[in-house]
Amino acid sequence: MIIGMTNGLSKIQQGISSLKPSEQKVANYILKHPEKVLNMSISSLSEVSKVSEATIIRMCRALNFTGYQSLKLSLSASLNEPVIRDRKYQDISENGNIADIMKAVSFNNFRSIEDTLNVLDVKEVEKAINAIDHARKVDMYGVGASAIIALDFEQKCKRINRWCEAFSDNHTQLTSAVHLTSQDVVLAVSYSGETKEILESVKVAKGNGSTIISLTGFTKNRLQKMADIRLYTSSQEKSIRSGAMASRIAQLNVIDILFTGIASKNYEEIAHYLDRTRDIVKNRR
Amino acid sequence: MIIGMTNGLSKIQQGISSLKPSEQKVANYILKHPEKVLNMSISSLSEVSKVSEATIIRMCRALNFTGYQSLKLSLSASLNEPVIRDRKYQDISENGNIADIMKAVSFNNFRSIEDTLNVLDVKEVEKAINAIDHARKVDMYGVGASAIIALDFEQKCKRINRWCEAFSDNHTQLTSAVHLTSQDVVLAVSYSGETKEILESVKVAKGNGSTIISLTGFTKNRLQKMADIRLYTSSQEKSIRSGAMASRIAQLNVIDILFTGIASKNYEEIAHYLDRTRDIVKNRR
DNA sequence: AATTTTAATGTAGTAAAACTTCATAACAAA
DNA sequence: TTTGTTATGAAGTTTTACTACATTAAAATT
């Protein structure tokens, strides 16, 4: 299996929906003629896509590239990737054959992991790991499907003797946020990044000087705007009907990355904790 | 390793011998630090490699690139050359590089999905889907990490107006199991298949004639033995230290399959429910 | 409906990057 | 020593990417 990390094309595909209209024009042109764009200057691209150069730069930034050159480099990298570029996410179909469903669901989940790797910024991940590693306490906020992600991370942290708490309702979130300090970290999970409760709680925590880490879909959203450290998951999910399936796997994948990062940084200490936890649990059988 | 088409690195390697001395200086620097060069302007590269900018351009031309930009694009493409990993799960290493961790974790999660597809029996999956579909009520039992899987399924079922409840502790599990009937289904999740609490509750449910579905690792275990329908996840997890990471993704993948199967069988009805649920949730923002 | 605010996009200017031209240095051959 | 050839850099030109500000369009507020 193949895992690449700098797939500019997929980054554009994923981010395009949150771009402004004229920015989308450029993005669409790039998606249609990626090879051409590689030999185009910003001015000729502005000509063919009928927007100003400034808009192109803004689009690059909106997609988390540092500029036009950086987008082109990333694009070039992705064009060299032999991965089945156009295998689309599969939707649920009526009365589908079970074997097909098994394959389609697994494929979607796999894709969401791969795509997430393209929108996750290594630097931001590193910052997040450091922040959590040095935090006095980590608060996790998530409601609905995201609550489960929060619970998962809470459990993981408990195993390695870190103070982390997951809150899934507005009241307890706020109650906890009120007491946070600048030494604390909030990891807020929301696929849309617009969940009212989360935004409210994060605001309170931010007011207390806590470090905010957001984990959202790869769009411009209010949660991500408030955050100090921004983590993204793929947002290409085929059908909203499928009910946040793939996105949740992608989020868990990010959680795994964070946890593994922390574990790696504190290898000796954490191996010890994990071994102890495992032994105790084993004896409970 | 796959053969790329625009491998700038190898182009340099091959052409370097026919370059002029000062041009070779540049080429050598690029071969040593290719990633760095990607974010370097021609002037900074001229500085670090101690040759003039003109020499760099001449070198690019000598290697059949149209210029410095074109060399960089080609370099970027070749650096992304996907690594096809051996099929082993990767373990956490000490003080690992973050980018590597991201890749390794994602790879493991991907593998666990793929492997699970190999140990899941289509017939059993079909039976499970039918059982759940026709059940009056579904009880889910899971403790620890598996509790999260249960919660996830519970949420999904709520969205489509099915009666499903997740229990994560012995007492409530037993309390619920006592009242189950032959029209009910128990979906019991345990990676080891030996969790005492789960076994106990399942026994009670079985006594009431309920259909038992087990979701365990691919081993012979007591839970699987008691079950009417047996679902498995891959059990190849590399290190127990990594803390039930990949296995949990695999379990969720199975949950997704079950849910999708039910959705597919009741397409119209469920699409309706999902649309309604989504709208309501949206308005809460 | 009028006014203010905010967001989206383009214009024009700037700094820096890539590339060219030409001068010079180093060396070899006559 | 002179002449020709090759390798390299300095300085200049053009092009590119990017910035700051202005304008327009759309929302929100009065």
Image (cartoon, coloured by chain):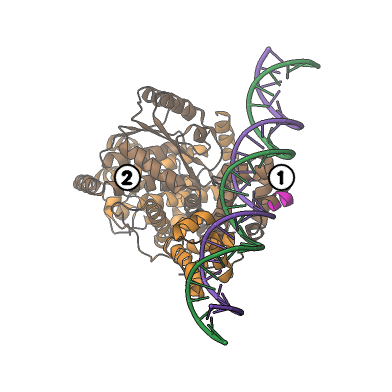
Chain colours: A brown, B orange, C green, D purple
Query: Position of B184 compared to B65: left or right?
Result: left
Image mark 2: chain: A
Foreground residue among C30 and C21: C30
Seen at 29% across and 34% down, the residue is A163
Seen at 34% across and 48% down, the residue is A260
**What type is the residue that disc 2 sits on?**
Ile
Q: Say how many tags the image has.
A: 2
What label does residue B263 carry, if any? none
Q: Which residue is mark 1?
A: A51
Q: Is residue A282 magenta?
A: no
The image shows residue B245 at horizontal and vertical percentages of: 35, 50
Image mark 1: chain: A
Seen at 57% across and 67% down, the residue is B58
- Position of residue B27 relative to residue A274, above or below, is below
Q: Which residue is mark 2?
A: A262
Q: Is residue B193 visible?
A: no
Task: Write down the region rendered in magenta.
Answer: A44-49
Foreground residue among C30 and D30: C30
